[in-house]
Amino acid sequence: MTPPRALTRSLLAALLMAALLLPMIAPTYYLQFFAKAMLLAIVAASLNLVVGFGGMVSLCHGAFFGLAGYVLALASPSSSGASLWTSLPLALLVVAIAAALVGALALRTRGIYFIMATLAFGEMFFYFFHDTRVANGSDGIYIYFEPEIVIAGWRLVDLGNKTSFYYVALASLLLAIIVISTLVRSPFGAALMAARDNEQRARSLGFPVFRIRLTAFVLAAVLAGIAGYFSASQFGFVAPQTLGWHVSATLLIMVVLGGMKSVLGPVFGAFVLLGLEEILKSNIEHWKLIEGVIVIALVFMLPGGLQHLAQLAFSDRRAPAGQPGSGASRAGRQHHG
Amino acid sequence: MADIVLSARHLTKRFGGLVAVSDVSIDVHRDEIHAVIGPNGAGKSTLVNLLSGEITPGEGSVHLAGKDMTARSPDQRARAGLGRSYQKTTIFPDVSVFANARLAAQARSPKALRFFGDAGRDPVINAQAAAALSEAGIAAHADTPARHLSHGGQRQLEIAMVLATTPSILLLDEPLAGMGPAEAQDMIALVSRLRNGRGILLVEHDMDAVFALADRLTVMADGHVIATGTPAQVRADPAVRVAYLGEDCL
């Protein structure tokens, strides 16, 4: 049982209204927190295109997120902000090329070997920035001025303003959700899920499985790159840790926590995980330990992810609500219909 | 000849020391069923996989409608008009029967990989899927989840999926495997109808079915072709009688 469509829609509309009105009531600190969470939600949702809908568990997604930030840092002049019109496309182009290279090689493997290959490529990005002087090595690199969004000499948006930045992050998240939802419903999405569910059959029907997967991998990386670009701008700093494997692992936790079967699941997963961190961090010394226990408990209680909560709330209790152990290979099947 | 839809020449495939397929040449004509028979281990399945592109041959060539496809991948061959079924049923069990056929029809559509639009709402693709389900005789089960179909129904669905890709050549790998007598009769009638306008290569163990369906027969043993011709010629071939059919079989 899934909740009635109309109810889901009104809940989402209410959430959107709240998100739009938040800057009027929330202190700056929380605006910054929500902006950060929305950007990471983009990355988690884009990762789910690869993991949930594509059936490919990638441990390289954090690298694409961090790489876009590095491109911004390197493209920024020392005495002023980079122009968004040139630096954002440049960052996304670099990320797309990197993802195409990684994908072209890693997608020749399957299952656990794909996980290992993406992990290895992710670590290559980490050590490239960690061990070379390209961008200050392990010290990281500062971005002293936010990118400028200027049209004909007029500043369209000031990314330094916390409220403006919040709305840019919100708009990016909405755009990412729309793009991913459209893809999932499209013929391309159907082909991607067909390749996940039965690769041999998909190929013998005539679907170019490799090309489909590579396209999804690159598109997801570019979406992560948008978030990485703005995230670097928000914090004014990038370091190798921004693209290490633990970023990719955290993103995977967001995806699994939120649920792989829907576009919005990972978005909620990102908010819940970051919210949890925020609360625990300020109250408990060994907060990571507690966080781990809570995450494990959530995964055990809600094997379908947090989206499963909504299903439970509206189910008639007789219907088998969960699919324990349903992994990436089975996730998202309702989108075929 | 213009009506040869599939032509393989001197195919050889070795797995380590084992020669699974040795110097096999075979033609499939339009409007004909060309059956390949032989004992277990004769190399029939390897031959089908060589033709569909799932295995690349050590030597030899595969032509589809006159075009060299030897170096092409399975999906490229599928888009060139080759459709295949598997010995072990290979469908998408978690979605409806119709969704299975629709995916198949989508694979051959010019819009197969569009980034926009609803995959389920293309009228051309939906019509093609519905036609394929009708032709395979399972239109009544369109809304059933594919995993709930009977074994025979799933075999029919697999044929329907192949048909939805509008193939000019079908490779059917033991379509009767695991079927009861009634289901088998339906499937024989279905396969017999399918030859119109298409060429079919049929691998099958059920000899009654083979002799009921085949226009042409190739007999394999130990990776080699030991006889080829019309069913009557093959029946009369002394080598076949000794090596495969057995003296008392006919």
Image (tube, coloured by chain):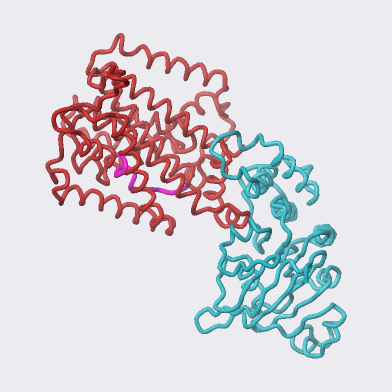
- Residue most extreme to the front: A152
Q: Residue at left 24%, top 45%? A: A244
The C terminus of chain B is located in which quarter? bottom right
Chain (cyan): B
Chain A: its colour in the image is red
B40 relative to A146 in the view: left or right: right
The N terminus of chain B is located in which quarter? bottom right
Q: Which residues are magenta?
A: A55-65
Q: Is residue B168 above or below residue A78?
A: below
B28 relative to A202 in the view: left or right: right
Quadrant in which residue A4 is drawn: top right
Mark yes or no: residue A296 visible: no
Q: Residue at left 72%, top 70%? A: B203
Q: Is residue A154 above or below residue A115?
A: above
B18 relative to A158 in the view: left or right: right
Q: Is residue A62 magenta?
A: yes
A183 relative to A113 in the view: left or right: right
